[in-house]
Image (cartoon, grey):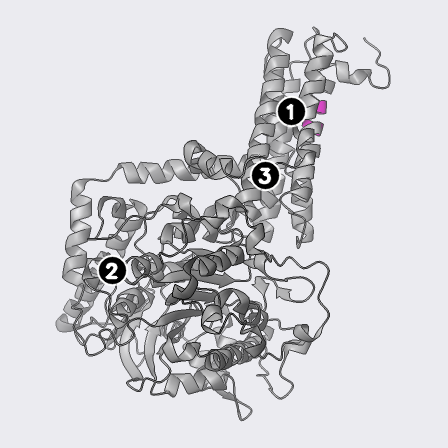
Amino acid sequence: MRHYGRFDWIKSRLGFIILLVLLFWLKSMMAYVLDFNLFSGSSVIQVITIILNPLPLPLLFIGLAFYFRKSRYFYPIAIVMAFINTLLLYLNVIYYREFTDFMSVSTMLGYNKVNQGLSASGLALANFHDIFFWLDFVVIIGLFLFKKIKADNEAPNKFMSFAFSTLGIFLFMLTLTLGEIDRPQLIGRQFDSNYMVKYLGIDAFTISDGVRLRNINRERNSVKKTDVQKALDYIDDHNLSDVTKYQGVAKGKNVFVIHLESFQQFVIDMQLNGQEVTPFLNSLYHSDSTLSFSNFFNQVGQGKTSDAENMLETGTFGLPSGSLFASHGSDQTFQAMPAILHQTQNYSSAVFHGNNASFWNRNNVYKNMGYQYFFDASYYDTSGDKAMGYGLKDKLLFNDSIKYLERLQQPFYAKYITVTNHFPYALDDRDKDANFQTASTDSDVVNGYFETNHYLDQSIKEFYDYLDKSGLADNSMIVLYGDHYGISNSENKSLAPVIGKSADDWTDWDNQQLQRVPFMVNMPGWHGGGIKDTYGGEVDVMPTLLRLLGVKNAKQYVNVGQNLLDSKKEQIVAFRNNNWITPEYSRAGDEIYDSNGKVLKKLTTKQQAKVDKIQEKVNKQLSVSDSINQKDLLRFYTPKKFKPIQAQKYNYAHGLGKLENLSVKLGDNATDLYHKNGDKSTVDLYQTDAPEKSEPRSDTSRITQQNPDDVDKHDAGADNEPNP
C-alpha cells in the first residue's frame, strides 16, 4: 500500500479524476455567477440544483477513463473529456454574452451562422476571467511535460468505474427529481432554457436539446409532397373570402396587441360588493369603437401562454403535448403577423415583456416570426418589489416601455405581454386598491384573482390615457385578448357561487363554458363596432386581423382559422383535447351536451349525424395544424412576394440604440413618435399610481440604456430594422 503526502493524492488516478471534476465545478460556478447570473432570483431548490448540477454528468463522462486500465489511455481520455466539458461551457458563455441564451444543438450544427454573428463582436465578448476556463489545462499538461506529475500505472479497483458511473447517475436523478418537484414537466415542456440549466446543468441541457432535435428531424424527414398539398387543399377550402364590410377599416393603423394574462370573459361586467371588477375594460367592451366577441374561447394546450401567442400570430394550434415554442420554435418556419405586415405594409414590430427573454424560448421564436425588437426583462428595472414571479408588474411595464415605444417607426405592430394577473394571484398590499373589496370565498386563489384583475384593468386604463395624450390613439387599433383560463377546474366550484352557480350541480360543461376569454378590437374614433356573438377561438384571430388591416391576398397565408367577421364562418370551436363547442351542441369529456348544459344520453339519428360531422371537422382542423407544425411544412410553401425569415439577422441587444440610430438615419422621413413630437420625449405624459414610481431608483437596476454613439458597429447596421 502506498502512502500519500498532503497533496500527493492528486498523483493517484482517483485523485486526478476528482481534481478534474472539481476544477470543472469551479469553472461552472464562475460562469453561473459572472456570466449566466443563475443565482439571481432563484428559489432554495434552484440554488441547491445550481450548486449540484455541474457534478453528475462530468463525473459520468470524465469517470469513463476508469474503464481503461492502461495509463496511456486513462489520462488522455480523462483530459479530453474534461476539455470537451469545458469547451461546451465556454461556448455557451460566449454565446450567452451576445444572445442572452444557451446554445442549442441546432445552433452548434449551424456553426457558420453562429460564427458570423459572433465574429462581428470579436474580442468585445471576451472577459478577463475567461483565462480561468483554460488555465488548468495549461498547468496540468505542463506538469506532465515537466514530469512534476507522473502517470499512475497502478490500475484502480475494477469497481471504481462502476462506482463513479453510479454516483453520477444518482446525482443526476437527484437534480432531476428536485427540478420536477419545483417545475413539474420540466423535461416534457422545456419552457425555458435558463430553468433547464438551473436544474440540470449545461451538459444535460445540451443532451436533452439534442434528443429534442433528433425527434423533430425524424418528424420532418418523414414529409411527403402529398402532406404539403393536403394541407394547402384544406387551407384553400377552409379559408374565407376577403370581402366583408370590415375589410381594410384599420389599414395603415398602428397595432397594439395586449395580452391579458389569465383573464376570463366572465369577469367582464362582473360586480363585487357593488363595484365593477374591471370598469375600464367593461367600457371598452361596450364601446361602439370596439368589435367585441362574447363567445370567444381559448384553445391552448400544454403550451399555455405560448400556445395562445402562436395561435394569434400564425393561426395554427399548439402541439398535442408540450409547447411548440419550446420544442420546435428555434428551427420552425413561420408565416406570422409581424413578418406579413412588415413585408406587405412596411410595419415595424416589437414585443414588450417584463420576463426573461428565454422563457418559452421567445428570444428564438420571435426571430423566426420576424419580430424586429424584443424588450424583455433586461431592459427594465426589475429590482426589489418591482417584479413578481413572472416578471415586471404591469403598471411598470407599460410605464417603463414608453421610452422604447416612442422610438418605433410607424406604423408598428407592438405586443405587450402582461404578467401580474398570473397564478397564484398574490398582489402586494400596496398595489391593492383600498376602495376595492374582493370576493370572500373559501379559496385564496379565487379571492386574489379579482384583485389582480382589478390591478390589470387599472394598468390598461393608464396606458390608454397615455395613448390619448400622446396622439397615438388617433391612428391605432388596440387588440385585447385573454390567453387562457385563470381559475382552474379544481377551483371552479369555489368560484361557482360568485357567478351565480351551484357548486353541487357543477359539470364538465360548466368548466368548458368558462374557457371563454375576452377578444376586443378597439379603434378609437371609429364607430362601427358592437358585440358579436359569433363562436370562435384564438386560431381565428390572425385571419380576422389580416382582413381588418387590408392585407391583400390574405387567403394565401397558411392558417387553420377563419375570419370572425365573415357571416359564413363555421360556428365550431375546437379544443386541443379534441373536445369542441358550437352554439347548439358541445363535447366535454365523454358527454355530449345541448346548449343549456343538459347531457344528451341518447342522440337521435339526426343529432348523431350532426355531432359526427362536427367531430370530423374538429379532428381534421387539428390534424392539419399538427402536420403543418410538426413536419414544418411551411418550409415547402412560400406565398407570393413573401420572403422567408432569416432569423440569424436578428439581434435583440441594444434595442434603444438601434431605434435611435434608425431615426437619425431616416431624418425627416422618420415616423417615430419621438421625431413627430419635435424630438421631445413623451415619457412625462405617462401617469401611473404605481407606488414603486414614487421610490428612489434602486442601485441594482437591470435596465439597459444605450447612447446611439456607444452602440457596437454590428448593431448600428442591424438587419432587423424596417426599410426607410
Image quadrant in which the N terminus is located: top right
State the residue lying farthest toward the bottom: 274
Toward which corner of the image does residue 431 lie, by quadrant? bottom right
Numbered disc 2: secondary structure: loop
Give the spatial CA distance, label 1 vs label 2: 52 Å
Q: Which residue is mark 2?
A: 560
Toward which corner of the image does residue 11 lie, by quadrant? top right
Q: Which residue is mark 3?
A: 125
Against 254, is 128 above or below? Answer: above
Which residue: 56% across, 75% down? 452
**Mark number for residue 190?**
none
Disc nearer the start of the sequence (1/2): 1
Residue type (three-letter) at the residue carrying disc 3: Leu
Decide: few, some or many residues near mark 1? Use Cα within 10 Å; few <14, some 14-19, many ≥20: many
Which residue: 42% across, 55% down? 372
Is mark 1 in CB contact (under 8 Å) with mark 2?
A: no
Decide: few, some or many residues near mark 2? Use Cα within 10 Å; few <14, some 14-19, many ≥20: many
Disc nearer the start of the sequence (2/3): 3
Q: Which residue is mark 1?
A: 164
Residue type (three-letter) at the residue carrying disc 2: Val
Decide: few, some or many residues near mark 3? Use Cα within 10 Å; few <14, some 14-19, many ≥20: some
Give the spatial CA distance, label 2 vs label 3: 43 Å
As rendered, which of 372 and 25 lies closer to the eye?
A: 372
In the drawing, does residue 103 fall left or right of residue 174? left
